[in-house]
Amino acid sequence: MVRKLLRIGAILTVVVALLVGAAAGVLWVLGPPTHEGYDPGDFEVVGEGDPIVGRRLVELMCVRCHFDPESDALAGRSLGREYNALGRPHASNITRDEIRGIGEWTDAELAMLFRSGVHPRRKELLPPYMPSLPNVSDVDLAHIVAFLRSDHGWVAPHRKADPPSALKYSAVLSAWFEWQPGRDHSVPVLRPDEAEPIALGAYLANDLLQCHGCHSAALDEVDWLVPADTKGFYEGGAVLVDLAQHKVVAPGLTQRAEGGLAGWSYEEFRRALVDGAGKDGAVLRWPMPRYRGLSEGELSALYAYFKTLPAAAEAPARKAPYKVVPQIVDPGRHEFERLGCPSCHDPDAKDYRSLEGITETYPDDASLAAYISDPRSVDANAWMPAYDNLVDEAQMKALLEYVRRRVERGPYAPPPKE
Ligand code: HEC
Ligand code: HEC
Ligand code: HEC
């Protein structure tokens, strides 16, 4: 009797295991679910956008993922290990090219992708490595779309194909059982005005610029529709990766003294966002964006909003992504590392990141200094951040010497003797 029961138990266990295995296998083969109920016909771009305002928004919101330095345009790039928890995403070519880009997309298709997160053609909900904008205001959405249709160099057609994004199995499961599309139809969304600074700040931080997407607990547990439901909302701790694949931990932005913004003056906050320097003067490294395009009213609204966030109970330990060589050992390399240049310029890379081309492009120090101070003043389509407010003359001199030495003799060549 007991043996019989045991045998039945064993058979049942095997059957259940096979069924679970088969279901898992089927999901793996099927991939993420489609959302056939979403149709571009239910979405629209309301009103006429201004491509100049749109350019400012795209620079603040999209360039960090979609910019391809090889083509100097939004022709897409691999996000490397940045979103390891989800897979290996490739940010798409979003230039006006009709075949490889989004030149043929209608306004309604763009509105559907941004509002709901559902890809208008594949009908799949894009994983949170492509942020959706469910709560973006109608005016801001119209500005973004107007820019994507404009004749700016960043969206000029480039026929560069996108390798597919590879999704991890755990992310396929989340797509089936966890992730939900954003809004399913267009309802009017208004932009708060400057008379209500806290509401405007909350809109800018959570709905437009999505600071919580990086500054919360984890990149794969972000809620775009109800931002405050994000795990560890503004408590920090998400592990990000820079362009050279160093790990960078995002700090918290609640009113905490350690690992937060308690005690920050408006000037300090403004400097962090606009010039990229922290409270202690240390340079903030990629992927913290530079928000040069924000107006004074928008910056002070953001400051007012962050003042309302209660202190988090804990803050993640901050760890520098790479060591900074002491100034007395090597003043030039010290500047390069202090300024965060290694976040993007990896000597092992074969492209612009190695800086190999500079001997030809910038033969004299004045032109090289002009580029580093403000790349946009030399190349209108450049995306590299400006350093004019972070280096003085002596520091720039040391930096230029090192940049040239690095290209000629390698990153660890000793500095010249005095
Ligand atoms: C954190 C990185 C990231 C940011 C920021 C980002 N994107 Fe994306 N985007 C992606 C990735 C990755 C994909 C590809 C997703 C896929 O196909 O699996 C994508 C896909 C797209 C697509 C679909 C293109 C196609 O041909 O399928 C469009 C359009 C798009 N993004 C526009 C934008 C715009 C406009 C912004 C700024 C408002 C933006 N993205 C911000 C990462 C990003
Ligand atoms: C793409 C990810 C990302 C986004 C988006 C982002 N940040 Fe950051 N931020 C970072 C990282 C990473 C750091 C830390 C950089 C370092 O340690 O060098 C940082 C640092 C900061 C700091 C300095 C904090 C300190 O303790 O020194 C402030 C302030 C800040 N961010 C504010 C914001 C605000 C406000 C927004 C939205 C308008 C925002 N960030 C959007 C990644 C991001
Ligand atoms: C956020 C990423 C990032 C950071 C940080 C960064 N750069 Fe760049 N840099 C780029 C990109 C991208 C390019 C290619 C041109 C472009 O599109 O902006 C570039 C180009 C350059 C060039 C011109 C290369 C050429 O072949 O024309 C120089 C010189 C340079 N960077 C120096 C520096 C120095 C010095 C620092 C630190 C003070 C620095 N960069 C920090 C992204 C970055």
Image (cartoon, rainbow, N blue to C red):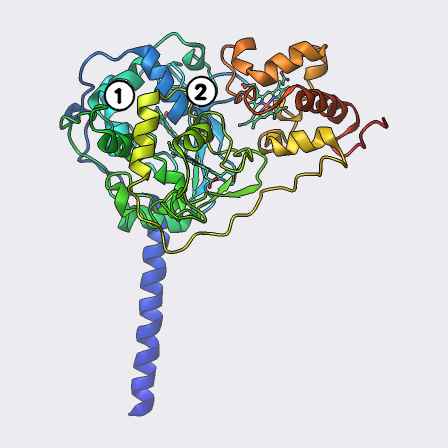
Disc 2 residue: CB within 8 Å of ligand 1: no
Q: Secondary structure at mark 2?
A: loop
Q: Is residue 366 left or right of residue 189?
A: right
Q: Quadrant of residue 390?
A: top right
Taking the spot 35% from the left edge, 55% from the top edge, the residue there is 24
The residue pinned by badge 1 equals 140
Q: Determine crowd level at label 1: few under 14, some 14-19, many 20+ residues with C-alpha closer than 10 A.
A: many
Residue 74 numbered mark, or none: 2
Q: Do we see residue 120 in this rendering?
A: no
Taking the spot 44% from the left edge, 46% from the top edge, the residue there is 238
**In this view, the mark in front (1 or 2):** 1
In the image, residue 55 sits, relative to residue 305, either above or below, namely above
291 and 98: which is toward the camera = 291
Q: Do we see residue 88 in this rendering?
A: yes
The answer to whether the residues at label 1 and label 2 have Cβ atoms under 8 Å apart is no
Residue 300 numbered mark, or none: none
Q: Residue furthest top?
A: 151
- Identify the image quadrant of the C terminus: top right
